Image (tube, helix red, strand yellow):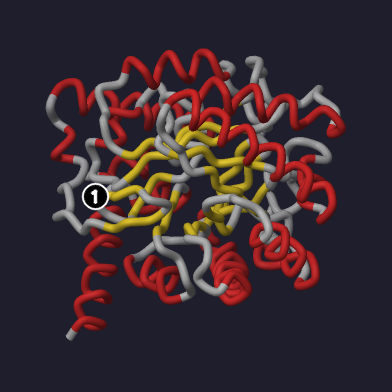
Amino acid sequence: MYSLARSLLFCLDAERAHDLSLTAIETAYRTGFNPLLATRPKALPTTAFGIEFPNPVGLAAGLDKNAAHVDALASLGFGFIEVGTTTPRAQPGNPKPRMFRLPEHEAVINRLGFNNDGVDALVANAERARFDGVLGINIGKNKDTPNENAIDDYLFCLERVYPRASYVTVNISSPNTQGLRDLQEEETLRCFIGEICEAGERHAATHGKRKPILLKIAPDLGELELDSIAEVLLASSIDGLICTNTTIDRRAVSGHRYANEAGGLSGKPLFERSTAVLRGMAERLGGKLPLIGVGGIFTGTDAVAKIQAGANLVQFYTGMVYRGPALIGESVDAIRALLDRAAA
């Protein structure tokens, strides 16, 4: 069914197709036809960050930026849903067109630029949702907030989302907000993470429950930069790491008509690099921090490769664009088979 729908959607502009896909998933959910989209996988309980997930396969941030479709997306069988990125104030993002499909490479380039309705709108949507599973909320800064004041935006969002989130992801790795990735520099990151974690502890005391805080990093970092990030994380009270965001590297799609479009490249061309970063960070962190592997998952075998590289959980987004909801159950079953073989 999805292959037919994809053929129709791929005739449309990529961002228009994205919006229609969400509408279709929402309609199927509300009319009771969502079982036609995907068969929910059998449970595969997985614990990370002190949270028990019904299965280790999640939706990456970016698909549902405003938490407007949480119930519908959760009904497809994900073990957890991550929404956002959200910012303190609503912003339109970058000018259109800003999303491009590269079917020959099973990839997408986007330069959306944190387009969203603002954190208060996201929280209101999340509170209306009936979903009582694991909900991650991904936070960022407004485009017009200078880096020297970026921490204020993140602290503002953290305070707003804390009561509703199961965990919070700090996104300083999108390539589509100018200067954002500079926050990954060692000394800047050390101060930044310190303030975020201190605020998290204050909110935990206020709300009587501690919510894990995760950092999401870029795949375009050098080995020395990754060394520095690992040192900062190990010295902090951060709860986990997501590897990785999209890449600005275009070598894998060189020659394609969209190769020179600005933005982050996701999909199959990202798989090897994101998995290498994941493996390297797993080695550096030595099991002291749980990891989420994301980037280029298109098959159950890909999901297994992330687990073998050190991930406790996996996420995807572009894989859904090309494979549809069937990828969820396929990934859960492949990870289950891996764990069964390991236990035998």
Residue 28 location, x and y as percent?
21, 28
Which sits in the foreground, 19 or 335?
Answer: 335
Helix, strand or loop for disc 1: loop
Residue 114 location, x and y as percent?
64, 30
Residue 332 location, x and y as percent?
26, 60
Mark 1 nearby-residue class (10 Å; few <14, some 14–19, many ≥20): some
The residue that appears at 33% across and 39% down in the rendered structure is 134
The residue that appears at 50% across and 14% down in the rendered structure is 121
- Determine if residue 30 is in view: yes
Specify the quadrant of the image occupied by residue 74: top left
Q: Total of numbered circles in the picture?
A: 1
With 272 as the anchor, is 48 left or right in this view?
A: left
With 299 as the anchor, is 282 left or right in this view?
A: right
Residue 18 location, x and y as percent?
46, 33
| Residue linked to disc 1 | 54
Check the image and report above or below for 23 versus 275. Answer: above
Which sits in the foreground, 263 or 104?
Answer: 263
- Considering the image in quadrants, where does the C terminus appear? bottom left
With 45 as the anchor, is 257 left or right in this view?
A: right
- Considering the image in quadrants, where does the N terminus appear? top left
The residue that appears at 41% across and 58% down in the rendered structure is 314
Which sits in the foreground, 25 or 124?
Answer: 124
- Determine if residue 97 is in view: no
Residue reaching furthest to the bottom: 344
With 191 as the anchor, is 140 left or right in this view?
A: left
Check the image and report above or below for 270 versus 126. Answer: below
Residue type (three-letter) at the residue carrying disc 1: Pro
The residue that appears at 23% across and 45% down in the rendered structure is 77
